[in-house]
């Protein structure tokens, strides 16, 4: 999976993070290194859709949090991906 938006949502499902922390988390759990342009482009799109929002911080870095709508969207996408994975596994047994 390499969709930047889904990777950001999955990262934020684990808790609020700023951009660099998301990049490191995504690299750890997905093995995908998102460049700053890709990451911040995804953050902008997700924020415009209401799936994430910025949270206050004492730090100069801007953390984001997953909204209820973002959580619902992520759950839908994960269920869809789960179906694809299960189908592929089943079919590979007969290949």
Image: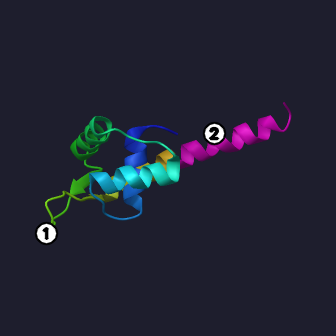
Please give the label number shown on residue 58: 1
- Residue located 27% across and 44% down the image: 43
Q: Residue furthest top?
A: 95
- Residue located 44% across and 37% down the image: 3
Q: Is residue 89 left or right of residue 95?
A: left
Q: Secondary structure at mark 2?
A: helix
Q: Is residue 89 left or right of residue 10?
A: right
Verify whether residue 3 appears in magenta.
no
- Residue located 23% across and 46% down the image: 47
The location of residue 45, given as percent across then percent down, is 26, 39
Looking at the rendering, the stretch of residues picked out in magenta corresponds to: 78-95
Is disc 1 in contact with disc 2, using a CB cutoff of under 8 Å? Answer: no
Q: Is residue 5 visible to the viewer in this orientation of the structure?
A: yes
Which residue position is annotated with label 2?
84
Verify whether residue 91 appears in magenta.
yes
The location of residue 6, given as percent across then percent down, is 42, 44
The location of residue 58, given as percent across then percent down, is 13, 69
Quarter location, residue 18: bottom left
Q: Secondary structure at mark 1?
A: loop
Q: Earlier in the sequence, mark 1 or mark 2?
A: 1
Q: CA distance from mark 1 to mark 2?
A: 42 Å
Residue in the foreground of this view, choosing between 1 and 52? 1
């Amino acid at each position: 999976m390499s969709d930047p938006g889904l990777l950001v949502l999955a990262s934020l499902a684990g808790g609020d993070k700023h951009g660099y922390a998301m990049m490191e988390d995504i690299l750890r759990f997905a093995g995908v290194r998102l460049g700053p342009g890709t990451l911040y482009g995804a953050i902008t799109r997700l924020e415009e859709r209401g799936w994430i929002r910025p949270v206050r911080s004492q730090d100069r870095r801007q953390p984001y949090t997953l909204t209820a709508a973002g959580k619902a969207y992520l759950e839908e996408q994960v269920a869809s991906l789960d179906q694809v994975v299960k189908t592929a596994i089943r079919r590979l047994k007969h290949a």
